[in-house]
Image (cartoon, rainbow, N blue to C red):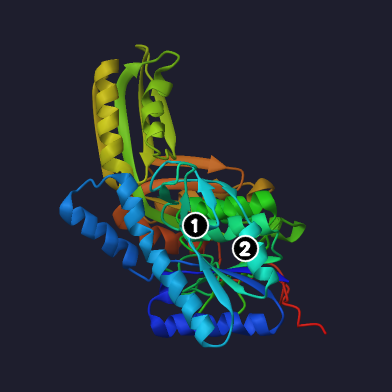
């Protein structure tokens, strides 16, 4: 069985934890599995490197910034391979460019284009444990790139897809996917399985347990994905294809995101092509626009409000101000003190009244809704940031997510023992 494992920053935070990871990897190896292990930088290391660059200039060149921050994963991949070898298990570490993992040239937010797996397969065939530095790749021109925050998840799933691995395990500091953030809701319940689509919606709405692109890749390539803790032996959460049982659950989880900002441009001409003129320069900078609302007035003018990640707020606001001048808009306003709260569940496709219940619950607690966005299985509301935790707890209680909604099997994936 070929297994790709990914260990996050808290799992490899120091030498002792790296040794614990090595022991877990060896346990799998002794059971007869082939292992590809993807690692993140040590906890806090990426931020430390970014801050070093910003001590020199507030806006370091992105090409050199990628070259700098990619060294965090270089350190942990080498240390893990050294640790495995010291314990008597043959191992080899690779950086993204050595494999290679080819990406686009959008520095700090690159996307994977292609992975050459011949080198990895050769080492696996020789019985070695392959360790890969996550989060990084290389352009066809030879420039080092990084995949954005959470990019090691994407590396792991992409490798699992390219290698046609039997299983991809994402190890983190939580035991799986919960109905809500356990730090906010004390009685949040761990889910034993969830659909790719639900997990994708949760990741896009603020659930930090998995990076959104990694879930998208898993869904496209049907990668068996499990989220579990590197600190316990507890079974994790399986992310898999939707089945009939999942649709019986009205709401699977409540998510929130404080990494939100809202920008409004007022009094733009109401004619074809205006939206493109506003959003094209934002997209060219790699900024993701989430929720969009347009209001049209009788005088053939329109107001457009949209949300972007708070980390991109300043850049996006400056872009919109420049566009507003060209369009002779009335004014531009921004707000980076907002949050997005979402409910997610496959059962929404076949059940009515979910939105009403959400809106009534928020109103009952005096929480005003600024913006609303919906999909088949998700409803999101933008609210004042100060009400975030209250909203999450209230919705979790209203939809009774602390209770088991369906009878779930105890185990969904069992690792086979070594066969003789």
Q: Which quarter shows the N terminus?
A: bottom right
Mark 2 neighbour class, 10 Å CA radius: few under 14, some 14 to 19, many 20 or more: many
Q: Earlier in the sequence, mark 2 or mark 1?
A: 1
Quadrant of residue 257 within the rendered picture: bottom left
Residue 72 lies, with reference to residue 242, above or below; the image says: below
How far across and down, in percent of the image, does residue 309 sit?
36, 46
Residue at the extreme left of the image, as rendered: 56
Residue 367 can be seen in this image: no
Residue 373 can be seen in this image: yes
Residue 358 lies, with reference to residue 245, above or below; the image says: above
Residue 296 lies, with reference to residue 127, above or below; the image says: above
At mark 1, the secondary structure is helix
How far across and down, in percent of the image, does residue 278 sit?
37, 25
Which residue is pictured at 62% across the width and 74% down the height?
A: 128
Residue bearing the label numbered 1: 96
Q: Which quarter shows the C terminus?
A: bottom right
Residue bearing the label numbered 2: 120
Quadrant of residue 332 within the rendered picture: top left
Q: Tell me: 67 left or right of 412.
A: left
């Amino acid at each position: 069985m070929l297994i790709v494992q990914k260990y996050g920053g808290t799992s490899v935070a120091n030498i002792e934890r790296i040794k614990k990871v090595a022991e877990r990897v060896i346990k799998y190896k002794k059971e007869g599995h082939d292992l590809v292990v993807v690692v993140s930088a040590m906890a806090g290391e990426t931020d430390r490197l970014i801050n070093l660059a910003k001590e020199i200039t507030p806006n370091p060149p992105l090409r050199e910034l990628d070259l700098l921050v990619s060294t965090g994963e270089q350190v942990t991949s080498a240390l893990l391979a050294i640790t495995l070898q010291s314990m008597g298990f043959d191992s080899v570490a690779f950086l993204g460019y050595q494999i290679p993992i080819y990406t686009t040239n959008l520095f700090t937010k690159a996307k994977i284009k292609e992975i050459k797996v011949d080198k990895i397969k050769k080492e696996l065939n020789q019985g070695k444990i392959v360790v890969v530095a996550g989060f990084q790749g290389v352009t066809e021109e030879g420039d080092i790139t990084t995949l954005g925050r959470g990019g090691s998840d994407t590396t792991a799933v992409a490798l699992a897809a390219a290698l046609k691995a039997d299983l991809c395990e994402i190890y983190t500091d939580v035991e799986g996917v919960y109905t809500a953030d356990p730090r906010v809701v004390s009685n949040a319940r761990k889910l034993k399985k969830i659909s790719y689509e639900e997990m994708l919606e949760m990741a896009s709405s603020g659930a930090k347990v998995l990076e959104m692109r990694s879930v998208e890749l898993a869904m496209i390539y049907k990668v068996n994905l499990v989220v579990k803790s590197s600190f316990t032996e507890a079974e994790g959460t399986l992310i898999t294809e939707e089945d009939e049982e999942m649709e019986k659950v009205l709401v699977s989880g409540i998510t929130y995101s404080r990494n939100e900002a809202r920008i409004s441009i007022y009094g733009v001409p109401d004619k074809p092509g205006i939206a493109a003129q506003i959003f094209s320069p934002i997209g060219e900078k790699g900024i993701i626009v989430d929720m969009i609302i347009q209001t049209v007035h009788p005088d053939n003018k329109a107001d457009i409000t949209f949300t972007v990640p708070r980390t991109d707020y300043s850049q996006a606001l400056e872009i919109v101000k420049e566009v507003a001048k060209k369009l002779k808009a009335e004014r531009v306003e921004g707000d980076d003190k907002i949050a997005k709260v979402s409910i997610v569940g496959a059962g929404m496709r076949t059940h009515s009244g979910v939105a009403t219940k959400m809106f009534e619950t928020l109103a009952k607690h005096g929480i005003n809704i600024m913006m609303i966005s919906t999909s088949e299985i998700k409803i999101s509301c933008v609210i004042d940031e100060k009400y975030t935790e209250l909203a999450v707890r209230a919705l979790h209680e209203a939809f009774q997510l602390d209770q088991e909604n369906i009878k779930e099997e105890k185990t969904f994936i069992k690792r086979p023992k070594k066969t003789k």
